[in-house]
Image (tube, rainbow, N blue to C red):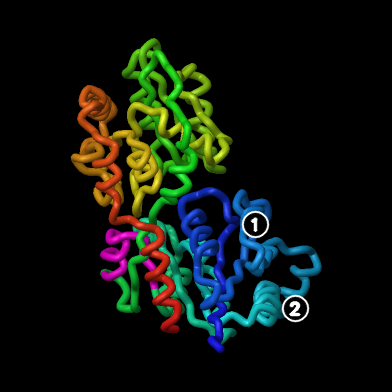
Amino acid sequence: MTIKKKVLFFTKDLNRTGAEMILFSFLEKLDRTKFEIGVVVFQNGGDLIPDLPTDISLFYLNSKFSLLDKIKFHLGEDVMLNRLKRIQDKFESDIWYINTITNAFFLKYSQHFNVFKFLHIHENLFSIGYLNIKETEIILNNVDHFIACSNLIDQQLSSFSTKPRTIIASSIDKNFIDSCLVNYSKPAKNKIKIIGSGTICHIKGVEIFVEISKLFSPLAYEFVWIGKWSNTGYSEVLKRKISQENSIIKIINEIDPMDYIREISSADLFFSCSREESMGLVMMEAIYCGVPVLATNSGGSSLIVNDQNGKVCFDSRPEVLALEIQSLLDKHNDFEKLAMRESISQYDGQEEIKKLEVLLEKI
């Protein structure tokens, strides 16, 4: 009888962000004849939790501390470590698979357990500059194997660590997109629609989207941003700016996954104004839907956007980007949907999961 590897995944909350969606596809599709799966979340209420397969062991790691917990801590008890020990004792994992640098703090507890540690990096590694020295040392010393979400991140990893690493390229769920677009016809509209998407934060450059919208007539153009407000000063300042200036931007904060795909598909152009992208799944979704993409030079955009599906612009001035938007709109009929899909065919989720299975089996 084959002994299954026990893999315990660590993540924040399983909301519908790119990194969490990639993890969810792993949780859904990893071969259950080879692996027993558990997942640890430390925030309740994630959008994807109700959809988890029933054979997955779900653990909630409470990250809040009561007064009693604080007293125990001051008396020398490591409360968080003990919570992890209870999870490990119950699941008896062989492998810890930590999703994103944001969750890498779990690594400082790993020395207490006989487990192999993966860290899946979805972030552009410039973000490691925001970590303190101690956090960075924990990552460099305690990870056994790095997973890079793209060639770009793999190259960045090679410059600061000699630990083993593997590229598991992020990709979209093409079958789900197909199911959303069955029997769907784009609604009639009297304005050209330009869409952007992602959490409203500094990295996504949403203020650029706002500034560009001012350069187009609201009688002929519609600008839509799909994404939740981040809990940051950037988000609050931008929200007030949009309100005070009576901006024509439409913000869609909450949307059903199927309606999200249909909204993207209804656009005439997708505009990515990100400052940094390790991959850029929203661009890939737009391209698969047959929507041309204009992207700023975010790093990851160059992995996806090309002459068959859009253009990468290396100048972030709003007036220049506005001209590029108009140029792509004028050439809209030059983009053929099948050719666009072929341009991202190398990013195949099923093949990437097979690569991950081979890797996990070797441990």
Give the SS element for disc 1: loop
Is 330 situated left or right of 172 in this image?
Answer: left
User: Picture coordinates of residue 176 (x, y %)?
Assistant: 48, 47
Q: Which residues are magenta?
A: 146-158
User: Picture coordinates of residue 125 (x, y %)?
Assistant: 35, 60
Is 276 situated left or right of 99 in this image?
Answer: left
**Residue found at the far front of this picture:** 183
Location of residue 321 with respect to 55 vertically, above or below: above
Q: Quadrant of the N terminus?
A: bottom right
Q: Residue at x 63, y 55 (%)?
A: 49
Residue assigned mark 1: 43
Crowding near the residue tagged with mark 2, few <14, some 14–19, many ≥20 C-alpha atoms within 10 Å:
few
Badge 1 vs badge 2, beta-carbon distance below 8 Å = no
Location of residue 3 with respect to 187 vertically, above or below: below
Location of residue 327 with respect to 280 vertically, above or below: above
Type of secondary structure dominating the magenta stretch: helix
Residue type at the position of mark 2: Leu
User: Picture coordinates of residue 329 (x, y %)?
Assistant: 26, 24
**Residue found at the far bottom of this picture:** 1
Location of residue 277 with respect to 113 vertically, above or below: above
Residue type at the position of mark 1: Gln
Residue assigned mark 2: 75
User: Picture coordinates of residue 62 (x, y %)?
Assistant: 70, 64
